[in-house]
Image: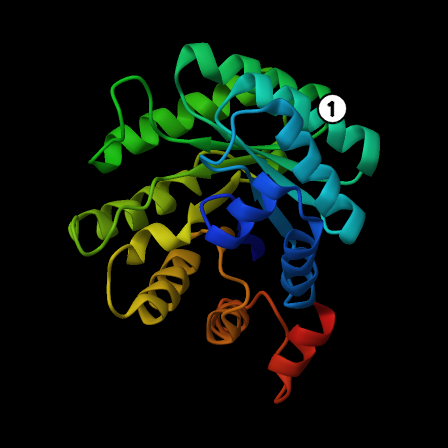
Amino acid sequence: MILIGERINGSFKDIGAAIKEKKKAPIQEWAKKQTEAGADYLDVNLGAVSKSPEDFSWLIKTVCEAVPTPLSVDCNKLELMRAGLETHREVAGSRPLIINSTTAEESKLMPLVELAVKYDGGLIGVVMDERGSPQDVDRRVELGAKIFAVASEAGLTPDRIYLDPIVMPLKFMQEQGKNVLEAIRQFAMISDPPPHISVGLSNICSKAEERGLINRTFLVMAMAAGCDAAICNVMDTELVNAVATAELILNKEIYSDSYLKAYRKRA
């Protein structure tokens, strides 16, 4: 399971303030804590706090200076993404990265696929287009297949393609949970080997009371359906323990009585 730490995001008050004031310490502290918790990647996102390419470059450089952990470079503005990726290449060299994210919209898909090829990165494809987020399984699968086909034709191998089925808040769109799980099952059959399947986990528990329990339960169910990546709170010990246990049950790890300690040690 690929765990992508969600915490370096300008939408969090402490990170937003650190970006505005150009304070490295809070950002680098979160980079180190998430790395120590076992994050495979760190998602780096300005959020709404800035639209400046210089700020995005500064944020990426700040994180790369603190830890060797690969980044998920997260931005919905092409100009900022280009600046961020160039900075990443300058400061991190050939360190692995994920571009987060494209959609199936024609105007957005090809430019970001081309950037993934140019910078040797993975690419998250969110299954929505100019018509918005799909509500049914068939539309999710149709858009996922489109993203996969375009990325493959451009030279990205399945291990560099991540499909995101769009997780909806359980509190407000309860019926969507089963649709997402079924879309994940069908994404896993798109190719052999299949692409990665990634979820933005915190969406499922938005505005809910039992946030941690909902996250853990949904992620384990998604893993059973074929999901193998999540942008999530890697500081949630019970969540990470649930992931380790699910991998064991799915026969992706070898059992031992001390499997949790082994999982933590490896991380």
256 up-or-down from 146: above or below:
below
Q: Quadrant of residue 145?
A: top left
Q: How is the image coloured?
A: rainbow
Looking at this view, is 118 or 187 the one in front? 118
Residue 29 picture location, percent across and down: 67, 60
Graded by Cα atoms within 10 Å as few (under 14), some (14 to 19) or many (20 or more), the crowding at tag 1 reads some
Residue 246 picture location, percent across and down: 48, 70
242 up-or-down from 144: above or below:
below
Looking at this view, is 255 or 239 the one in front? 239
Q: Does residue 155 show up? A: no
Residue 153 picture location, percent across and down: 58, 16
Identify the amino acid type marked 1: Glu
Residue at image x 66%, y 82%?
A: 261
Q: In the displayed structure, does residue 80 sit left or right of residue 136?
A: right
Quadrant containing the C terminus is bottom right
Q: Which residue appears farthest toward the bottom when viewing the image?
A: 257
Quadrant containing the N terminus is bottom right
Residue at image x 70%, y 35%?
A: 58
Residue 243 picture location, percent across and down: 50, 68
Residue at image x 57%, y 56%?
A: 3
Q: Secondary structure at mark 1?
A: helix
Which residue in the structure is indicated by mark 1? Answer: 86
Looking at this view, is 110 or 7 the one in front? 7
Q: In the displayed structure, does residue 266 sit left or right of residue 140?
A: right
